[in-house]
């Protein structure tokens, strides 16, 4: 069903822009999480420890921008930090 009202057309255009911005933010976050997970999988505790604060910062920014929910960001951070800590104890 085509949009007929001016306000509906504007809102649709705005929603498409917001969707693109949110996708960019989520994609950036997922890329950094993937880098961290690769460091964890390779057993590189030093690299994982250096990447963790950067990933936390990006996750927090993504939450602040509204691309993901607060609890989702907290869950990512919790699980990643647990994995890095487990890696560090295994390396010691």
Image (cartoon, rainbow, N blue to C red):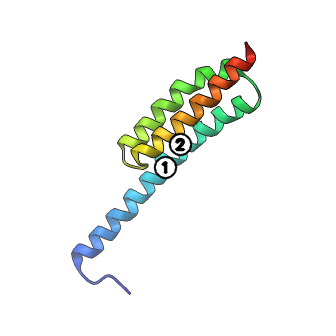
Q: Is residue 27 above or below residue 90?
A: below
> Where residue 51 sits: x, y (%)?
59, 25
User: What residue sits 53% from the left and 32% below the top?
Assistant: 55
Please state if 47 lies on the left or on the right of 53 as rendered.
right
Q: Residue furthest top?
A: 92
Please state if 22 lies on the left or on the right of 90 as rendered.
left
Q: Which mark is residue 86?
A: none
Q: Is disc 1 placed on a helix, strand or loop?
A: helix
Residue 1 occupies quadrant: bottom left
User: What residue sits 37% from the left and 48% below the top?
Assistant: 66
User: What residue sits 32% from the left and 63% below the top?
Assistant: 14
> Where residue 39 sits: x, y (%)?
70, 29
Q: Dot 2: few (<14), some (14–19), or many (≥20) neighbours within 10 Å?
A: some
Q: Is residue 61 above or below residue 22?
A: above
Q: CA distance from mark 2 to mark 1?
A: 6 Å
Mark 2 touches mark 1? (CB < 8 Å): yes
56 or 71: which is nearer to us?
A: 71
Q: Quadrant of the C terminus?
A: top right
45 or 88: which is nearer to us?
A: 88
Q: Dot 1: few (<14), some (14–19), or many (≥20) neighbours within 10 Å?
A: some
Q: Residue furthest bottom?
A: 1
Residue position marked by numbered label 1 in the rendering? 24
Please state if 11 lies on the left or on the right of 44 as rendered.
left
User: What residue sits 43% from the left and 42% below the top?
Assistant: 62
> Where residue 40 sits: x, y (%)?
70, 30
68 or 27: which is nearer to us?
A: 68
Please state if 42 lies on the left or on the right of 84 as rendered.
right
Residue position marked by numbered label 2 in the rendering? 28
Q: Is disc 2 placed on a helix, strand or loop?
A: helix
In this figure, what is the number of numbered marks? 2
């Amino acid at each position: 069903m085509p949009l007929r009202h001016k306000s509906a057309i504007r809102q649709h255009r705005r929603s498409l822009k917001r969707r693109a911005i949110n996708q960019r933010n989520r994609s950036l976050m997922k890329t950094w999480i993937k880098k961290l997970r690769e460091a964890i999988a390779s057993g590189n505790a030093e690299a994982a420890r250096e990447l963790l604060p950067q990933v936390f910062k990006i996750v927090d920014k993504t939450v602040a921008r509204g691309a993901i929910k607060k609890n989702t960001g907290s869950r990512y951070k919790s699980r990643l930090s647990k994995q890095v800590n487990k890696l560090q104890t295994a390396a010691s």
